Image (tube, grey):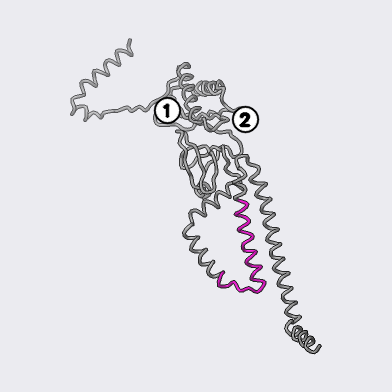
Amino acid sequence: MNTLSEFFGELLEFINLKNIEAMGIKIFAATAILLVAFWVWRILKRFIDRRLGQDSHNDEATIRTYRNIARFIVMVPGILIAVNVLGINLSSLFTTSGLFAVALAFAMKNISENYISGAMLRLERTIKPGDVLETEGAMVRVKSIGFRATIVRSKDERDLVIPNSQLVQNRVANYTYRDSVCRVETTVGVAYSSDLKKVREVLESVCGQLDWTSSQHQPAVILSDFGGSAVNFKIRVWIENPWDAGKRRASLNEAIWWGLKEAGIMIAYPQLDVHFDEPFTKAAGLEGAHREKEKDEEKKEME
């Protein structure tokens, strides 16, 4: 009995109630941290499923990859913090992993930018497969948005690979972001002797006869400026498919040509009148020819 009582006495001395209480608090805190991390991950997972699931071009493999990335970003820090709360010293691990993360970030800077940009494009949905874009002066159609790059199709039927970071950081025109209506504009110049009212009527009639213009906007004919050899008009029409803008502009130019030609209105071209001073005509021996020309003009006027 004495031996048994001595054993329990030593056991009670070894087990300190304060230590048990402190350890219980640490376990509770670590468990709470893990539960919060898991809760955040579940919310982020539902957000990814809802945002990416709306696009029919996103397959299950793509959505699963974004889920795994989000789970890694949320759960790994949560587990490390929970372990540290339990009293396990991870300072050396944090220091080493921090240095490694900085080195890895510098080494994979461009790649990480493209991955993050790809996630932003998918979540914000500012650019989607099928959209018609204008980037670096070229019109392209988006085929697919990948993790690192976006595949687009150019007008000359070439598949181009554009890093996602370029679409996020640079200025890009999206012709189909809100709707697919696009404006097509061309310019024509007529002679100063033309009847401007008649010119406007002809141009408006030409635009009204086009069967491929959008009904959402009326064509516009604008007298833009007075050029050196012509009075310039801008003709604006709207179309439903921006991918056909070049072809529609060519059709518009051809229709304007035939409309003005049938109406007897001359499309102006650059002209230059040269007048020679009298000392120059005498020195060059052109004075006689100039006088003969004046006499011929006078005879014509008298007739």
Q: Mark 2 points at which residue?
A: 216
What secondary structure prevails in the magenta region?
A: helix
Query: Residue, x 54% and y 51% (percent of image)?
Result: 115
Quadrant in which residue 267 is drawn: top left
Query: Residue, x 52% and y 55% (percent of image)?
Result: 112
Residue 235 on image: x %, y %? 51, 28
Q: What element carries label 2?
A: loop
Residue furthest to the top in view is 303
Specify the segment rendered in magenta.
66-93
Residue furthest to the right in view is 1
* Nearer to us in this view, 19 or 114: 19
Q: In which quarter of the image is the C terminus?
A: top left
Is 36 included in the stretch rendered in magenta? Answer: no
Tally of numbered tags: 2
Residue 291 on image: x %, y %? 24, 20
On the picture, is 86 further left or further right than 282?
right
Is 92 included in the stretch rendered in magenta? Answer: yes
Residue 195 on image: x %, y %? 48, 21
Q: Is residue 153 above or below residue 39?
A: above
Q: Quadrant of the N terminus?
A: bottom right
Mark closer to the chain start, 2 or 1: 2
On the picture, is 284 further left or further right than 228?
left
Q: How crowded is mark 1: few (under 14 residues within 10 Å), some or many (20 or more)?
A: many
* Nearer to us in this view, 202 or 290: 202
Residue 230 image label = 1
Residue 300 on image: x %, y %? 31, 13
Q: Is residue 130 above or below residue 41?
A: above
Q: Which amino acid does label 2 sit on?
A: Gln
Q: How crowded is mark 2: few (under 14 residues within 10 Å), some or many (20 or more)?
A: few
